[in-house]
């Protein structure tokens, strides 16, 4: 950290005072997390300000604003691993909500808001990897573990990408694609969810019915109404570009499934940030976990059709 940045962070002592208190009084895990957040904030402001013309006072202000948001954020908003991005728009909208809840105007930040948030999450993940130590305090462990983790995640994503949808899911998605294309309307998550609710094996319908009788019909009705909502024009895409499909592929790989079936794609939707997932969570409340369990328990449920009655005779 250069002299100007160090002075700016030092001058922001009041903004970082909550970290100082928690560092002295919190649990070891809490102290470690706060150390990660503090260093990530400092690095973030340093990196983003390098490309901007900014005064020392603005540096102090930027550090204080980030600290305010990080203090108000939930732990799930501050991932300790740099995961594959699924929905930048949803993530950024969440951080704007955090800022607004604290009475902050993102348009008047001394540094570009989106650059700050994006860099902050990267720095938190990087700091977390370098802070982690094994039980013996081996300082070499973080670097070694990080290399193995990056290699494992890269290999897992590569292998998962080879797992495609099964026959009926593929047909249902193709029908949804063509329907949106014919109407020149963009395809969204509600279209995907409605498509798999109509699967012939009722695997996804059964998941919703396990939560509450009649729920599948109610959800399908709401999804059909969405199709009359004005949206952007259709844009061609490959299904692997869709975040919920990529997440479903990872679930398929983890469960050793040969293809992405209905329950796996439902899990992909439930585990991908989206307005649809949030609305579903609001609708179901605690029962969202019942739906997740129902989907997980049906991942391997397949109907075996035996060849009927062929008889080989002597000629």
Image (tube, grey):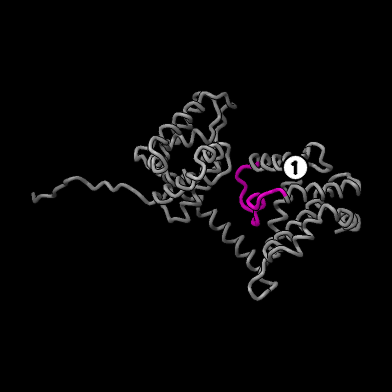
Residue displayed at 63% across by 67% down? 145
Position of residue 114 in the picture relative to residue 166 (left or right): right
The x, y position of residue 156, in whole percent, is 53, 57
Position of residue 254 in the picture relative to residue 132 (left or right): left
Identify the image quadrant of residue 95. top right
Residue displayed at 74% across by 47% down? 69
The answer to whether residue 102 is above or below residue 7 is above
The x, y position of residue 205, in whole percent, is 39, 39
Main secondary structure found in the magenta portion: loop
> In the image, is residue 83 part of the stretch drawn in magenta?
yes
164 vs 55, nearest the viewer: 55
Element under disc 1: loop
The x, y position of residue 64, in whole percent, is 82, 49
The x, y position of residue 275, in whole percent, is 58, 37
- Residue extending farthest to the left is 315
Q: Which segment is the magenta one?
A: 72-88
- Residue extending farthest to the front is 25
> In the image, is residue 79 part of the stretch drawn in magenta?
yes
Which corner quadrant holds the N terminus?
bottom right
Identify the image quadrant of residue 218. top left
82 vs 128, nearest the viewer: 128
The answer to whether residue 28 is above or below residue 200 is below
| Disc 1 target residue | 102
The answer to whether residue 177 is above or below residue 53 is above
Residue displayed at 62% across by 52% down? 83
Q: Is residue 252 visible?
A: yes
**Circle 1 crowding by C-alpha within 10 Å: few under 14, some 14–19, many from 20:** few
28 vs 181, nearest the viewer: 28
């Amino acid at each position: 950290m250069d002299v100007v940045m160090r002075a700016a962070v030092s001058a922001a002592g009041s903004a970082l005072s909550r970290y100082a208190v928690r560092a002295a009084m919190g649990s070891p895990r809490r102290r470690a997390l706060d150390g990660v957040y503090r260093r990530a904030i400092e690095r973030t402001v340093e990196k983003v300000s390098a490309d901007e013309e900014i005064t020392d006072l603005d540096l102090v202000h930027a550090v204080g604003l980030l600290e305010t948001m990080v203090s108000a954020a939930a732990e799930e908003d501050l991932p300790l691993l740099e995961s594959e991005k699924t929905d930048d728009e949803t993530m950024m909208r969440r951080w704007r909500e955090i800022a607004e809840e604290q009475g902050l105007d993102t348009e008047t930040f001394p540094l570009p808001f989106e650059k700050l948030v994006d860099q902050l999450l990267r720095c938190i993940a990087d700091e977390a990897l370098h802070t982690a130590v094994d039980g013996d305090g081996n300082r070499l462990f973080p670097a070694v573990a990080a290399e193995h983790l990056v290699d494992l995640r890269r290999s897992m994503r590569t292998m998962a990408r080879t797992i495609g949808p099964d026959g009926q899911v593929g047909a249902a998605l193709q029908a949804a694609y063509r329907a949106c294309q014919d109407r020149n309307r963009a395809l969204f998550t509600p279209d995907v969810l409605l498509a798999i609710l109509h699967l012939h094996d009722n695997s996804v319908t059964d998941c919703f019915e396990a939560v509450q009788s009649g729920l599948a019909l109610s959800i399908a009705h709401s999804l059909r109404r969405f199709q009359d909502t004005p949206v952007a024009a259709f844009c061609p895409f490959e299904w692997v570009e869709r975040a919920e499909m990529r997440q479903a592929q990872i679930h398929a790989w983890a469960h050793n499934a040969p293809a992405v079936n209905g329950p796996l794609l439902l899990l992909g939707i439930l585990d991908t940030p989206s307005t649809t997932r949030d609305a579903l969570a609001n609708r179901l409340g605690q029962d969202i976990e019942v739906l997740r369990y129902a989907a997980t328990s049906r991942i391997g449920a397949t109907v075996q059709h035996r060849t009927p009655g062929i008889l080989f005779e002597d000629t």
